[in-house]
Amino acid sequence: MRKQTLSLGVGFFLLTSSAMANDYLANVEGLHLNYSAPSGKASSTHFKYKEYEFLGHTEYDVELQGGTLFLETPDGPIQLDNLPASLSEVDALTINDLDLVSSSTSLSLSTQHFATQSTDSAMDISRLAIQCSYEDRDDEFMNEILHSCFNRSGNLSLGGFSSDGKEVLTDTQFTIRNNSMNFQMRAQGLKIKGNGKTYYENDQLRIRIDKAKVGFLNVRGRLFKELEKLESNTVSVHEPWIEIDLQ
């Protein structure tokens, strides 16, 4: 199997935003989760989802079966269905200090550490933060979040991203406004700044990188050589495009 690290990162965003916020206001603070197939443990300092609310330190049992995450709470099980395949097939999953707030107009998510491991790949993300604003909450709420984040207004930052133990990116920031994207990052010790476009439509995220420079030096080709290492059956990299299948 080919590597799926980039799609796993997107899958994590889908899990926490869709499953925890879809059609409901949610507030989760200090969530820690350690899963090693077939089960794991989790805890939080504040957890509000649907009719469930737990204040103070609360512990949970976790199981992942057939694309469904089961969270056993003190008041009964919470079942999160239809997880992305890239997440439902992992052998190990670690989340440290996750905060999630979903309101009627925006969603913010942050975590100090997120890591996955499967038979053929491993991924590690540190200090991830995502903020998106949206206009509607309806039966297609997940679609609205993705449309808003990547077509209208979204901010993403991360401290580090590693694939199979190799550092790929650090100190990364993306700002998206009306499909226009500006970014900065460190890769191979170089501080890279650039811009491009992002488009989300029909369960596919398309990213076009128009410029990538270190000072006045054009490094777009060099950057894409690194990004090509992240290709998988759901991620396609062909300069200047990166395409991610989110089905």
Image (cartoon, rainbow, N blue to C red):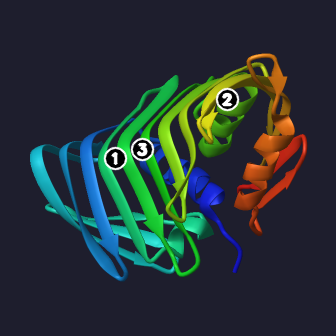
Q: Earlier in the sequence, mark 1 or mark 3?
A: 1
Tell me: residue 159, above or below residue 22: above
Q: Quadrant of the N terminus?
A: bottom right
Q: Check disc 1: other Cα within 10 Å, few if <14, some if 14-19, many if 20+.
A: few
Residue 10 lies, in percent from the top left, at 60, 51
The residue positioned 45% from the left and 30% from the top of the image is 108
Residue 4 lies, in percent from the top left, at 65, 66
Q: Residue furthest left?
A: 56
Helix, strand or loop for disc 3: strand
* Eye-nearest disc, 3 or 2: 3
Marks 1 and 3, how far apart at CA: 29 Å
Residue 245 lies, in percent from the top left, at 76, 57
Q: Which residue is mark 3?
A: 126
- Asked whether residue 247 appears in the rendered view, the answer is no
* Eye-nearest disc, 1 or 3: 3
* Eye-nearest disc, 1 or 2: 2
Tell me: residue 192, above or below residue 67: above
Q: Between residues 20 and 222, which one lies in front from this camera angle?
A: 222
For residue 112, which quarter of the picture?
top left
* Count of numbered marks: 3
Q: Earlier in the sequence, mark 1 or mark 2?
A: 1
Amino acid type of the residue that numbered disc 2 sits on in the rendered structure: Ser
Amino acid type of the residue that numbered disc 1 sits on in the rendered structure: Lys
Q: Which residue is mark 2?
A: 148
For residue 76, which quarter of the picture?
bottom left
Q: Which residue is mark 1?
A: 50
Q: Earlier in the sequence, mark 3 or mark 2?
A: 3
